[in-house]
Amino acid sequence: MKKICVVGLGYIGLPTAALLANKGYDVHGVDVVQTTVDTINRGEIHIVEPELDTFVQAAVKSKKLKANTVPVEADIFIIAVPTPFHEGFVPNIDYVISATKAIAPYLKDENIVILESTSPVGTTNKVEEVLKEEGVDTSKIYIAHCPERVLPGQIMRELVENDRIVGGTTPKATEKTVEFYKTFVDGEVLATDAKTAEMAKLTENSFRDTNIAFANELSILCDKFGIDVWELISLTNRHPRVNVLNPGAGVGGHCIAVDPWFIVYAGGEDAKMIRTAREVNTYKTEWVIEKIKNTALMFENEHNRKARVACMGLAFKPNIDDLRESPSLYITRKLMADGLDILAVEPNINSFSEFDIVNYKDAISQADIIAFLVGHKEFTTLDIDKDKLVIDFCGILK
Ligand code: SAJ
């Protein structure tokens, strides 16, 4: 069985490493954070993802998965490090470059180097350039991009079931990499070139961002026109070729709110719609803040006292505990900073460093205004007093 070195043990690298180890591969995981390495070597996990703990525990117990801060020689290298952006939405591929430099001394002829990180177009070729600069004869190895496409919360299932796109820097690299993914993916493994694979991933997330922006814009317009947007969407979606997504408090997470900027940065003036979609989704979050503030002000004028506002949900999407790039957390923080009396609710976490987390049932009874920011399942069965002001930004009550 081939040996695999996975660089970056985060939301993609660790599940991938654990899955491959459970498939019988000998996996060496690399992370720059010592505590992450130690946690994994104890058979534990440092991120929250259903089923991942079972996979990691089994992989470590069978000695098929070991973690370290430095790479080792292997047959296949997978790079799964973050690709955030610098100030001003400039793509930041520094982690990809440093991971590439880190594996360079361990590369041998016939090795495969796979970039899984979501990357701006041209990054896989950049990996090749960096390896050349580091003294690697890249004509003797295979380099490809195979973008990750898994949905947080469903990673272990989607890693196996989803179709994958593989684009090599040469046709032979594509072929070799496709062969590898076919050993553990049940979905189809589709072959293309590196740039198309990079753009395909960015397109997927931009497509979703653009469609959510459409829904968010509709929700603002419907509010203006006095129309229930949820009823509107459920009616329009009865057309055989219409499928409007759900409006919400904005778009969060570390993918959909980030990746479209990679296209906008490279596309400049020609990336009009993709840029506008980003702007609409960012604006929706500010609009939610204004809406809550105005409702609180109206309450205060009417009752001669400050309103208590329950912010229902802090995670970036329903039924997870992930707070990264979360619009609802941003909204809650902003309202608190602006002096509103806030009850912060998040049923998926017990405590938070910045403020108290209030039980959702207590918050419902104590609040004057209840703002549903995330559609968590706990919120669907609540019994809310008629005298409460309810603002449903995520359609949970429909
Ligand atoms: N959202 C809405 N309305 C909707 C759907 C989503 O407001 O109708 C919001 C969510 O509340 C959340 C954000 O969008 O704040 C993103 O959530 P998501 O569930 O759409 O996607 P992510 O960010 O969890 O995962 C995405 C997925 N990409 C696509 O569905 C095209 C996943 O397959 C990718 O692997 C992942 O990004 C990634 O890593 O790039």
Image (cartoon, rainbow, N blue to C red):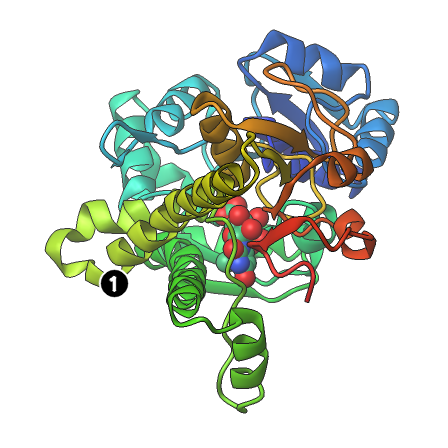
At horizontal 33% and vertical 51% (from top left) the residue drawn is: 278
- Along the line of sight, the residue nearer the viewer: 213 or 53: 213
- Along the line of sight, the residue nearer the viewer: 10 or 227: 227
At horizontal 74% and vertical 55% (from top left) the residue drawn is: 386
Question: Left or right: 24 with respect to 265?
Answer: right
Q: Residues within 10 Å of mark 1 (few under 14, many from 20)?
A: few
**Mark 1 secondary-structure assignment:** helix
Residue at the spot of label 1? 273
Q: Name the image quarter holding residue 306.
A: top right
Question: Left or right: 378 with respect to 136?
Answer: right
Question: Left or right: 132 with respect to 396?
Answer: left
Percent from the top left, x then y, of residue 78? 53, 35
Q: Quadrant of the N terminus?
A: top right
- Along the line of sight, the residue nearer the viewer: 40 or 349: 349
Give the answer, above or below, for where 204 lies relative to 279. below
Which residue is situated farthest in the left direction here? 269
At horizontal 19% and vertical 60% (from top left) the residue drawn is: 272
Q: In the rendered structure, which amino acid carries the disc numbered 1?
A: Met
Percent from the top left, x then y, of residue 101? 37, 20
The answer to whether residue 169 is visible is no
Q: Name the image quarter holding residue 265.
A: top left
At horizontal 77% and vertical 51% (from top left) the residue drawn is: 385
